[in-house]
Image: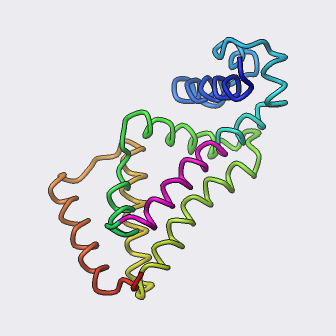
Amino acid sequence: MSTSNTRDRILDALQDILISDGYSSVTLELVARTAEVSKGGLLYHFPSKAAMMVGLMERIRALAEEEFREAVVSEEGVVRYFLRTSLPQSAAESELYWAVIAALRSKEDIPSEAAEMVKGLFDRWGELLHAELTDPVLAETIRLAGDGMYMSSIAGLGQPDPELTRQVMERLAEASDKVRRER
């Protein structure tokens, strides 16, 4: 079995446990059992529960970096890409991010490095929006609207009418077209 495959299985197991039972239920033993690896095999990749969380955040960051690259080169531009992806694309994505944020908020032994990675993802979208638009107020309004839609959705809060949401997103995108920097 390849090292990367084992590492991925461990992170998949961690993710499943976070989603189903929360961070307080995560133990090295449970993750090893769920991943079907020995505890020694788990410790080879992740010497602690905290190291596993950092590993999961690194995986999430790598996926987000790919989204950032796609947004920058896309025909639709960063604003439309950001708004379109400001609603989780699947129930699994929603559950994962909610579990991660709940774990970070738990104040348990989560390393600050993991929290900084998540904060960095939100900050990076703001940087990209501000770089694309000449109007910093509109860029920040779009960031806040997108973050709000995302957080509301993953928290399971009431959602506005889908048609109204589409209209809000379109209005913001149209306003951004007027102040979009030349590529």
The residue closer to the viewer here, 74 or 109, is 74
Give the residue at the far left of this rendering: 163
Residue 70 located left or right of residue 111: left
The residue closer to the viewer here, 5 or 54, is 5
Which percent across, then down, holds residue 18? 58, 29
Which percent across, then down, holds residue 89? 36, 43
Residue 122: in magenta span: no
Which residue sits at x=70%, y=29%? Answer: 4
How many discs appear? 0
Which residue sits at x=42%, y=44%? Answer: 155
The relative height of residue 167 versus residue 86 in the rendered view (above or below) is below
Quarter of the image for residue 9 reads: top right
The relative height of residue 115 versus residue 164 in the rendered view (above or below) is above
Residue 58: in magenta span: yes
The relative height of residue 90 versus residue 12 in the rendered view (above or below) is below
Which quarter shows the N terminus? top right
Which quarter shows the C terminus? bottom left
Which percent across, then down, holds residue 95? 46, 35
The relative height of residue 179 versus residue 71 in the rendered view (above or below) is below
Q: How is the image coloured?
A: rainbow
The residue closer to the viewer here, 23 or 5, is 5
Quarter of the image for residue 120 reads: bottom right
Quarter of the image for residue 165 reads: bottom left
Residue 11 located left or right of residue 87: right
Q: Main secondary structure of the magenta part?
A: helix
Which residue sits at x=73%, y=34%? Answer: 52
Q: Which residues are magenta?
A: 57-74
